[in-house]
Image: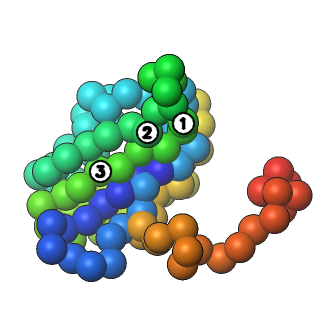
Amino acid sequence: MLLLTRHAVPSLPAPPQNLDKTIDAKALHDTFSAFGKILSCKVATDANGVSKGYGFVHFEDQAAADRAIETVNQKEIEGKIVYVGPFQKRADRPQVSMAQEQQ
């Protein structure tokens, strides 16, 4: 999962999802820096420091975030097809049942 956004933009683009567990913040930064200046970049981890399979990239401007979404979404990174799109607060996301997620 990847968060692509401009610093003051209220609607944040989304985090990259389905990242391989070997992807760290440096690899994420290296992958997305081609699209524009990155203000921050993070891979979400559990209490043991193991990747949760998603991360966030905060771009300086919205155009860079849009290019990254357009170019990387549904592409393969380290053997996995990743999702990169607009960020949505959990409360604003469509409700999906566990059975639907496993399909």
In the rendered image, residue 23, in percent from the top left (x then y), is placed at 43, 28
Instruction: Tell me which amino acid carries mark 3.
Output: Val
What secondary structure is found at the residue carrying circle 1?
strand
Give the residue pinned by disc 2: 44
Is 42 left or right of 50, judged from the image as shown?
left
- Looking at the rendered structure, which numbered label has been put on residue 86? none
- Looking at the rendered structure, which numbered label has been put on residue 52? 1
| Marks 3 and 2, the one that precedes in the sequence | 2
Distance CA(mark 3)–CA(mark 1): 15 Å
Disc 2 crowd rating (10 Å Cα; few below 14, some 14-19, many 20+) is some
What secondary structure is found at the residue carrying circle 2?
strand
Instruction: Tell me which amino acid carries mark 1.
Output: Lys
In this orientation, which residue lies closer to the viewer: 40 or 36?
Answer: 40
Q: Badges 1 and 2: C-beta atoms under 8 Å apart? A: yes
Give the residue pinned by disc 3: 57
What secondary structure is found at the residue carrying circle 3?
strand
Residue name at image x 33 percent, y 70 percent: 12
Q: Badges 3 and 1: C-beta atoms under 8 Å apart? A: no
Disc 3 crowd rating (10 Å Cα; few below 14, some 14-19, many 20+) is many
- Quadrant location of the C terminus? bottom right
In the rendered image, residue 16, in percent from the top left (x then y), is placed at 45, 51
From what the image shows, is residue 64 above or below residue 34? below
Residue name at image x 51 percent, y 31 percent: 46
